[in-house]
Image (tube, helix red, strand yellow):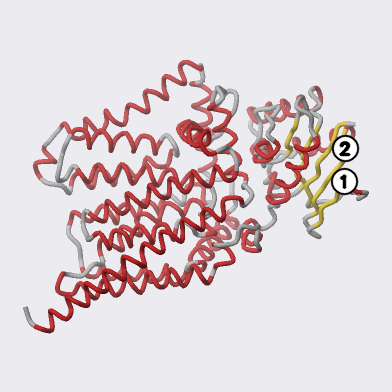
Amino acid sequence: MSKEQAKFDLLGGILEKVLFILAFSVLATTSISRLILRHIPLNRDEGTYLYLAKQATSGMRPYIDFYEMKPPVLFYLTGVFGALFGFDEAGGRMITLIFVTISALFVFLIVKYYASNTLSLAASAIYAFFSLNLFCLGFSFEIEHLVNALLLASLYFVLKTRDRPTLLNFALSGLFFSLAVLTKQTSIIFILVHVTIWFTGTATARKNWKSPAIFIVGALVPAILVSLLFTIHGSWEDAYFWLVTYPSSYTGGGISEENRYQNLNYFFGNITKFQLASFLLTGLALAIGLLRGMSKNKVWILIYLALSLLSIFPGYRFYGQYWQLIWPPLALAAFILFPMPNQKKWIGTTFFVLLMLTILFDLNRQKGYYFNEKYSEAYNVLYYQNPFDAIKTLSLYAKKQMNSGDKFLVMGSEPQAYLYAQKQAPTKHIFMSMLANQSPVFKNFTQEVLTSLKNDSPEYVLFNIFPFSWSFTAKEDQTIYNQSIKMVYEKYTPIASYQMDNNKYSFVGEGDAISIYQSNQVILFKLR
């Protein structure tokens, strides 16, 4: 070995230790950030998942006693962790931290299959960092965090079969893949990644017919359990509607071409801009890796990345949380494809040291978001005209006013209010914007809500009078809104409100006046 090479080896060793320290620092910092952000008010998706998980684990029947277009594993998996950490914002954020940590662990294990422990830790760090992106709703409890963990677990076990083609590894891969699909239907497309891994493995593995058979057996276990659940509850017809029929119409359109481009530009632009320097360097690592070429046993990584990008497109809504699925394959691709040969190892290590320093710079640049436990201006930019902080405040105020037997109804699409108020919804219809659909099924649902409001007369009603709560367009049925607000005005009196235009709370008990005819506000009503 030449003296020059010895110097490079020494430099590489020092840089690797520095990279390890920096990667560990990023992982620790992102975890601390999640703990700081655990009390940020829930958004409507978080509220839906946590509320329905609470319903499921209390014995309510999915798709009969409550409904959503997500598969049932979401409710029960969330319910298990919710029982441990609580069905509130802190509980939801702890669940997110757990699943992001699991994902980071599997990113580490997968990269370790190709690279060093230090690079594997750095890959985990960049995944953890990107997964916290504000405009991906990274801080919140979103279904994509669960899907990432389940998919990565499945891919890890199928990768292990290249060296150890045991039946257990194939079965576990199938099991976790099935759980991912039964958490979010679109996860089914990632079966192509498994197929690619299998076909690019050894000839011996490809000829082993037991491999796909055992994978299928593992995948059937959760599917059979879900089928038994539907059979016991007699909910096959309802489940088919919510899991197949309704999602087909949802992903098939329902959003104008103009709004599609607006959403794409808004989320892609803000997601990349928010962590721009780190995003560009990671992209550069991926590009350099592609230019250097790769072996066939790494092709699956690019297919994984391509499919994760494709998963953003169904429905053409391009919502921020959908982008969470690109972070694991991006981290995997960058850290598996880029690393240099041993004689040039210091070059790759230097690049990733620079990337970790850039991430730490980005964390400091946006510290007003990452390390601010209050509802800061950053959330107002993200949520635009969605007053989730006010919904929390007024729901907690309602909780103080109510007696144990009082009923509480939320008119709008903010089921998190039930969690804050610690009340059971008097109706299974907790997401009112869905009732704007003009099909006969939803017209019946609208009448059920109006009948409940008229006959049951809940003592308190939280009415959300702002556009994003109802998602109305000119083509949609506004009967539910028009008739319900008229009924509430006739039978109820306002006791508290939040006016969005001037950021003002009003409480009748403190002598404030409330105008019920003003738009862009949230009003808490009490039965006269």
Q: Which mark is residue 516?
A: 1
Horizontal arrangement in the rendering, residue 425 relative to residue 106 (left or right): right
Quadrant of the snapshot with the N terminus: bottom left
SS at badge 1: loop
What label sits on residue 479 in the rendered view? none
Task: Indicate whether 74 appears above or below 141.
Answer: above
Q: Residue at x 85, y 33 (%)?
A: 487
Q: How far is disc 1 from disc 2 in space, using C-alphas?
A: 8 Å
| Residue neighbourhood size for the residue with mark 1, other residues' Cα within 10 Å, grouped as few (<14), some (14–19), many (≥20) | some
Q: Identify whether 232 is placed above or below 29.
A: above
Are discs 1 and 2 less than 8 Å apart at CB? yes
Q: Residue at x 64, y 62 (%)?
A: 381
Residue 380: where, in percent of width, then height?
66, 60
Give how far across and how far down residue 279 sits, in percent: 42, 67
Q: Which mark is residue 489?
A: 2
Q: Which residue is at a point 36% across and 64% down the rendered structure image? A: 23
Whole-percent x and y of residue 207? Answer: 11, 38
Determine if residue 105 is in view.
Answer: yes
Q: Viewer-proximal residue, 217 or 439? A: 217
Instruction: Name the quadrant of the C terminus.
Output: top right
What amino acid type should be assigned to the residue bearing mark 2? Tyr
Q: Looking at the picture, tell me which residue is in the foreground, 183 or 250.
A: 183
Query: Residue 433 at x, y = what percent?
Result: 67, 40
Q: Nearer the viewer, residue 267 or 55?
A: 55
Identify residue type, mark 1. Ile
Residue 286 falls left or right of residue 506 = left
